[in-house]
């Protein structure tokens, strides 16, 4: 359903253009992004959580080999991803029958999202299965690549040739060709070129890219299959020794909050923060500098951002990113019903109150998302300094952002207390609603779009706050307050009801 909602929003944007054929590239890009997110959810999440269950130990000592077991589990996730991807086939066929798409466009619309979604999911699994030392060095390498991208793709930009003039001729040619190849032959660029009816010119590059992608997928599958048993042993039996020698902070007087915060920081997402944080700093400097921005620095990327929402759009996106850990709370505690039963068996015997669970979930969600909020505050300050928005608009946007985070957290906590696998809800909140708001706004219904929580953050900076705009944040705040009060009142009862319904159910039946 979330996949169809995303495609429907992209379809509305496409049909509301003067020439719908011009929106085919955007439609293909949205389908590719949806495939990547769904691959991470349906495949990466499934496989990365698999070794956390100690029930796997019985399979690992049986004649069934770990690699074969992993490949079987991976095939299940790939099949689910394929079914979700194929659910968009009726929409693609309808667009082709109306002449908005070429019949040959159906091939990349189905194959490329599935392939790159699978690569994303298996890649995340490999990352989770690798030893801590490998992940630490891999993170340093990726952060270095992020810095290189910010220097070359953003600061140098269209002035890359002038920057390369300092290198020898051979170095100039190699570096420029490598960057040009990366720019032209990535899946997003090739998908857009294909969807713009440039099929003969992109057929061979797409085939080469898909061949390399399939080879990479096989390598990632083999690596993750070979690491399953070792990762299981490291996760459950390897002593956790701190070799850094640094002094640890003492445990706070709220042990559940202390535990939840440490738990979510195992995979802290520093690479994403470096990328969006670095770009946010550069974009803020560009906005404040205005016409005084040096000519030898690139600005094409910033101009594109200005045309697609500017500071207000990026600030709204950062608020949504900060709310992602607030919406996806099920995995904060346990990845499966068996582990959840074992943990609740202990927690429900303690004098913990619903407020303690609430504070622990809020502490963990805020710890993961506060960096994005900090970058959003920087963008708001840049908008105020450059004169793009006044203090009232900034305050309205920030208030709307707080209400969005609160609403997403209330819904996520409600899903946690009920024991729901809220992946679908989280995808709708963090991906479906922003796309729906954009589609409604492009359809020239700004007042209706303002009712959707993520859109209210952006629209407060685009125009002076009005009563029509205020209705959206007020509704979001009322919903957040009502769901929060009801969720806190029902939390203990629903946790116990879930435990009674799941504990020992397999044995009893």
Image: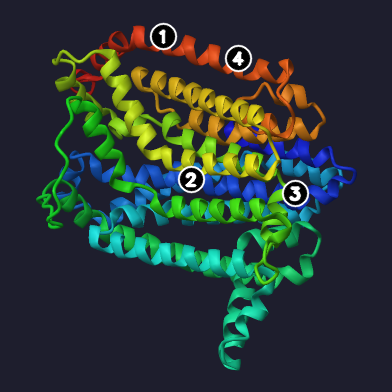
Query: What percent of the width, then of the height, locates residue 382?
Result: 61, 45
Q: Quadrant of residue 161?
A: bottom right
Q: Which residue is mark 1?
A: 485
Q: Secondary structure at mark 1?
A: helix
Q: Residues within 10 Å of mark 3 (few under 14, many from 20)?
A: few
Which quadrant is home to the C terminus?
top left
Q: Which residue is mark 4?
A: 474
Q: Please give the count of numbered marks on the rendered protein.
A: 4
For marks 3 and 1 on the same chain, the one whose residue lies earlier in the sequence: 3
For marks 2 and 3 on the same chain, the one whose residue lies earlier in the sequence: 2
Query: What percent of the width, then of the height, locates residue 315?
Result: 59, 40
Q: Which residue is mark 2?
A: 79
Q: Quadrant of residue 220?
A: bottom left
**Residue at image location 85% in from the left, 42% down from the top:** 17
Horizontally, is 131 left or right of 317 in the view? left
For marks 4 and 2 on the same chain, the one whose residue lies earlier in the sequence: 2
**Which residue ends up furthest to the right in the rendered image?**
18
Residue in front for this viewpoint, 302 or 335? 302
Q: Secondary structure at mark 4?
A: helix
Nearer to us: label 4 or label 2: 4
Q: Secondary structure at mark 2?
A: helix
Given contact means CB atoms under 8 Å apart, are the residues at marks 3 and 1 in contact?
no
Q: Is residue 285 visible?
A: yes
Q: Which mark is residue 307?
A: 3
Q: Secondary structure at mark 3?
A: helix
For marks 4 and 1 on the same chain, the one whose residue lies earlier in the sequence: 4
For marks 4 and 3 on the same chain, the one whose residue lies earlier in the sequence: 3
**Residue at image location 17% in from the left, 25% down from the top:** 253
Given contact means CB atoms under 8 Å apart, are the residues at marks 2 and 3 in contact?
no
CA distance for labels 2 and 3: 39 Å
Residue in front for this viewpoint, 492 or 143? 143
């Amino acid at each position: 359903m979330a996949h169809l909602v995303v495609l429907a929003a992209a379809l509305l944007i496409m049909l509301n253009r003067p020439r719908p054929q011009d929106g085919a590239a955007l439609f293909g890009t949205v389908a590719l992004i949806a495939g990547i997110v769904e691959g991470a959810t349906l495949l990466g999440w499934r496989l990365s959580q698999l070794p956390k269950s100690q029930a796997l130990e019985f399979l690992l000592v049986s004649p069934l080999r770990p690699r074969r077991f992993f490949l079987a589990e991976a095939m299940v996730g790939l099949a689910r991803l394929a079914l979700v991807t194929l659910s968009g086939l009726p929409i693609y066929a309808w667009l082709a029958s109306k002449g908005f798409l070429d019949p040959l466009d159906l091939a990349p619309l189905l194959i490329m999202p599935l392939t790159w979604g699978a690569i994303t999911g298996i890649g995340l699994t490999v990352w989770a299965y690798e030893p801590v030392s490998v992940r630490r060095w891999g993170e340093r390498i990726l952060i270095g690549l992020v810095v290189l991208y910010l220097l070359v793709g953003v600061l140098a930009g269209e002035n890359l040739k002038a920057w390369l003039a300092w290198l020898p001729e051979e170095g100039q040619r190699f570096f420029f060709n490598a960057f040009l190849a990366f720019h032209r032959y990535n899946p997003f660029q090739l998908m857009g070129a294909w969807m713009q009816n440039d099929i003969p010119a992109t057929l061979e590059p797409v085939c080469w890219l898909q061949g390399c992608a399939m080879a990479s997928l096989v390598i990632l599958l083999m690596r993750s299959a070979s690491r399953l048993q070792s990762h299981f042993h490291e996760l459950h039996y390897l002593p956790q020794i701190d070799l850094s020698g640094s002094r640890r902070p003492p445990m706070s007087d709220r042990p559940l909050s202390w535990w939840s915060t440490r738990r979510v920081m195992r995979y802290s997402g520093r690479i994403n923060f470096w990328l969006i944080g670095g770009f946010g700093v550069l974009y803020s400097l560009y906005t404040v500098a205005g016409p005084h921005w040096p000519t030898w620095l690139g600005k094409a990327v910033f101009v594109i951002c200005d045309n697609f929402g500017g500071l207000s759009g990026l600030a709204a996106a950062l608020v949504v990113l900060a709310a992602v850990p607030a919406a996806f709370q099920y995995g904060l505690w346990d990845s499966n019903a068996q582990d959840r039963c074992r943990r609740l068996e202990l927690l429900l015997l303690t004098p913990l109150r619903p407020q303690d669970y609430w504070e622990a979930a809020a502490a963990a969600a805020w710890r993961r998302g506060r960096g994005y909020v900090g970058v959003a505050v920087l963008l708001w300050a840049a908008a105020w300094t450059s004169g793009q928005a006044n203090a009232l608009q900034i305050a309205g946007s920030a208030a709307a952002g707080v209400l969005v985070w609160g609403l997403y957290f209330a819904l996520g906590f409600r899903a946690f207390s009920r024991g729901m696998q809220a992946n679908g809800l989280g995808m709708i909140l963090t991906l479906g609603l922003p796309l729906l708001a954009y589609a409604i706004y492009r359809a020239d219904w700004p007042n209706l779009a303002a009712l959707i929580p993520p859109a209210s953050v952006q629209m407060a900076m685009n125009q002076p706050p009005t009563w029509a705009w205020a209705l959206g944040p007020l509704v979001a705040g009322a919903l957040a307050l009502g769901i929060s009060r009801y969720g806190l009142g029902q939390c203990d009862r629903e946790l116990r009801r879930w435990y009674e319904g799941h504990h020992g159910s397999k044995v009893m039946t």
